[in-house]
Image (cartoon, helix red, strand yellow):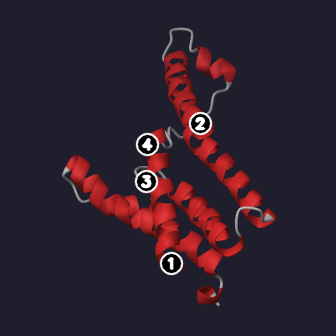
Amino acid sequence: MLHSNVLLFSALFSAIFAQIIKVPINYWRNRIWDWKAVFQPRGMPSSHTALMVGLTTGCLFEYGWGDPYFAISFSITLIVMYDTAGVRRQSGQHAIVLNKLTSTLQNSRGNIGNKLKTSDIPLKEVLDHNPSEVVGGIFIGIITAIMLAM
Protein backbone atom coordinates (compact mmCIF):
# COMPACT_ATOMS: atom_id res chain seq x y z
CA MET A 1 0.00 0.00 0.00
CA LEU A 2 2.64 2.52 1.07
CA HIS A 3 4.88 1.89 -1.93
CA SER A 4 1.93 2.48 -4.29
CA ASN A 5 1.22 5.90 -2.76
CA VAL A 6 4.24 7.90 -3.86
CA LEU A 7 3.06 11.12 -2.23
CA LEU A 8 2.52 9.54 1.17
CA PHE A 9 5.84 7.71 0.93
CA SER A 10 7.64 10.93 -0.03
CA ALA A 11 6.11 12.83 2.90
CA LEU A 12 6.72 10.13 5.51
CA PHE A 13 10.23 9.28 4.35
CA SER A 14 11.15 12.99 4.41
CA ALA A 15 9.90 13.35 8.00
CA ILE A 16 11.58 10.14 9.18
CA PHE A 17 14.87 11.08 7.53
CA ALA A 18 14.70 14.56 9.08
CA GLN A 19 14.17 13.04 12.54
CA ILE A 20 17.01 10.52 12.15
CA ILE A 21 19.51 13.07 10.82
CA LYS A 22 18.97 15.19 13.96
CA VAL A 23 21.19 12.78 15.93
CA PRO A 24 24.42 13.30 13.91
CA ILE A 25 23.70 17.02 13.51
CA ASN A 26 23.29 17.31 17.29
CA TYR A 27 26.55 15.39 17.77
CA TRP A 28 28.35 17.69 15.32
CA ARG A 29 27.07 20.78 17.20
CA ASN A 30 27.35 19.60 20.82
CA ARG A 31 29.72 16.60 20.73
CA ILE A 32 27.14 14.38 22.41
CA TRP A 33 25.07 11.51 20.99
CA ASP A 34 21.50 12.35 21.97
CA TRP A 35 19.27 9.56 20.65
CA LYS A 36 16.21 11.25 22.20
CA ALA A 37 16.48 13.84 19.42
CA VAL A 38 14.86 11.31 17.08
CA PHE A 39 11.62 11.68 19.02
CA GLN A 40 11.73 15.45 19.62
CA PRO A 41 9.81 17.84 17.36
CA ARG A 42 12.40 20.62 17.55
CA GLY A 43 15.94 21.02 16.30
CA MET A 44 17.73 20.94 12.96
CA PRO A 45 16.10 20.17 10.55
CA SER A 46 12.37 20.76 10.93
CA SER A 47 10.63 17.43 10.33
CA HIS A 48 7.24 19.17 10.00
CA THR A 49 8.65 21.24 7.16
CA ALA A 50 10.40 18.22 5.62
CA LEU A 51 7.14 16.24 5.68
CA MET A 52 5.14 18.97 3.96
CA VAL A 53 7.85 19.87 1.44
CA GLY A 54 8.27 16.17 0.61
CA LEU A 55 4.53 15.97 -0.04
CA THR A 56 4.46 19.20 -2.05
CA THR A 57 7.48 18.26 -4.16
CA GLY A 58 5.93 14.84 -4.76
CA CYS A 59 2.72 16.57 -5.91
CA LEU A 60 4.77 18.74 -8.25
CA PHE A 61 6.44 15.71 -9.82
CA GLU A 62 3.24 13.67 -9.97
CA TYR A 63 0.76 16.32 -11.17
CA GLY A 64 2.67 19.46 -12.25
CA TRP A 65 2.48 23.17 -11.41
CA GLY A 66 -1.07 23.75 -12.61
CA ASP A 67 -2.79 21.03 -10.62
CA PRO A 68 -5.08 21.87 -7.68
CA TYR A 69 -3.38 19.17 -5.56
CA PHE A 70 -0.09 20.99 -5.89
CA ALA A 71 -1.73 24.35 -5.09
CA ILE A 72 -3.41 22.96 -1.95
CA SER A 73 -0.26 21.20 -0.80
CA PHE A 74 1.91 24.26 -1.44
CA SER A 75 -0.49 26.53 0.49
CA ILE A 76 -0.63 24.21 3.50
CA THR A 77 3.17 23.88 3.41
CA LEU A 78 3.53 27.66 3.65
CA ILE A 79 1.18 27.70 6.65
CA VAL A 80 3.12 24.91 8.39
CA MET A 81 6.46 26.67 7.82
CA TYR A 82 5.09 29.98 9.09
CA ASP A 83 3.55 28.29 12.11
CA THR A 84 6.74 26.37 12.87
CA ALA A 85 9.14 29.31 12.69
CA GLY A 86 6.77 32.04 13.76
CA VAL A 87 3.72 31.36 15.88
CA ARG A 88 4.97 28.31 17.79
CA ARG A 89 8.37 29.90 18.43
CA GLN A 90 6.68 33.02 19.78
CA SER A 91 4.40 30.98 22.04
CA GLY A 92 7.49 29.29 23.51
CA GLN A 93 9.04 32.68 24.22
CA HIS A 94 5.80 33.83 25.83
CA ALA A 95 5.77 30.71 28.03
CA ILE A 96 9.26 31.56 29.34
CA VAL A 97 8.20 35.09 30.29
CA LEU A 98 4.89 33.98 31.83
CA ASN A 99 6.58 31.26 33.90
CA LYS A 100 9.10 33.80 35.25
CA LEU A 101 6.32 36.25 36.01
CA THR A 102 4.25 33.57 37.77
CA SER A 103 7.25 32.46 39.81
CA THR A 104 8.01 36.04 40.80
CA LEU A 105 4.41 36.65 41.84
CA GLN A 106 4.29 33.44 43.89
CA ASN A 107 7.52 34.36 45.67
CA SER A 108 6.47 37.93 46.40
CA ARG A 109 5.75 39.08 49.95
CA GLY A 110 2.01 39.38 49.53
CA ASN A 111 1.93 36.06 47.66
CA ILE A 112 -0.07 37.60 44.85
CA GLY A 113 0.26 34.35 42.89
CA ASN A 114 -2.12 32.52 45.23
CA LYS A 115 -4.65 35.31 44.93
CA LEU A 116 -4.48 34.99 41.14
CA LYS A 117 -4.93 31.21 41.41
CA THR A 118 -1.99 30.48 39.13
CA SER A 119 -1.37 26.89 38.18
CA ASP A 120 1.36 24.85 39.85
CA ILE A 121 2.13 23.37 36.45
CA PRO A 122 4.35 25.72 34.44
CA LEU A 123 3.71 26.37 30.76
CA LYS A 124 5.77 24.26 28.37
CA GLU A 125 8.77 26.33 27.29
CA VAL A 126 9.41 24.86 23.87
CA LEU A 127 11.15 27.20 21.48
CA ASP A 128 10.30 25.76 18.12
CA HIS A 129 12.32 26.06 14.95
CA ASN A 130 14.34 29.04 13.88
CA PRO A 131 14.36 29.95 10.16
CA SER A 132 17.57 28.00 9.41
CA GLU A 133 15.99 24.80 10.78
CA VAL A 134 12.97 25.37 8.53
CA VAL A 135 15.32 25.83 5.55
CA GLY A 136 17.00 22.55 6.53
CA GLY A 137 13.60 20.86 6.43
CA ILE A 138 12.94 22.35 2.99
CA PHE A 139 16.17 20.85 1.64
CA ILE A 140 15.46 17.45 3.21
CA GLY A 141 11.94 17.38 1.72
CA ILE A 142 13.07 18.38 -1.77
CA ILE A 143 16.06 16.03 -1.85
CA THR A 144 14.02 13.10 -0.53
CA ALA A 145 11.25 13.64 -3.09
CA ILE A 146 13.81 13.91 -5.91
CA MET A 147 15.52 10.69 -4.82
CA LEU A 148 12.18 8.86 -4.66
CA ALA A 149 11.17 10.18 -8.09
CA MET A 150 14.26 8.68 -9.73
Residue appearing at x 46%, y 75% in the figure: 147
Among numbered discs 4 and 3, the one appearing first in the sequence: 3
Among numbered discs 2 and 4, the one appearing first in the sequence: 2
Q: Nearer the viewer, mark 2 or mark 4?
A: 4
Disc 2/disc 4 C-alpha distance (Å): 12 Å
Q: Nearer the viewer, residue 99 or 125?
A: 125
How many other residues sit within 10 Å of disc 3, few (<14), some (14-19) or many (≥20)?
Answer: many
Disc 1/disc 3 C-alpha distance (Å): 19 Å
Among numbered discs 1 and 3, the one appearing first in the sequence: 3
- Residue 48 appears in the figure: yes
- Residue 123 appears in the figure: no
How many other residues sit within 10 Å of disc 1, few (<14), some (14-19) or many (≥20)?
Answer: some
Horizontal side of residue 33 vs 131, given as left or right: left
Q: Nearer the viewer, mark 1 or mark 3?
A: 1
- Mark 3 touches mark 2? (CB < 8 Å): no
* Residue holding disc 4: 132
Mark 2: amino acid: Gly
Residue appearing at x 50%, y 12% in the figure: 108
Disc 3/disc 2 C-alpha distance (Å): 15 Å
Disc 4/disc 1 C-alpha distance (Å): 24 Å
Query: Percent from the top left, x then y, of residue 109?
Result: 51, 9
Q: Secondary structure at mark 3?
A: loop
* Residue holding disc 3: 45
Mark 4: amino acid: Ser
In the rendered view, tell whether residue 92 sits above or below residue 112. Answer: below
Q: Which mark is residue 148?
A: 1
In the rendered view, tell whether residue 34 sits above or below residue 43. Answer: below
Q: Please identify the residue farthest to the left as the structure is shown.
A: 31
Horizontal side of residue 18 vs 28, given as left or right: right
Q: Nearer the viewer, residue 146 or 140?
A: 146
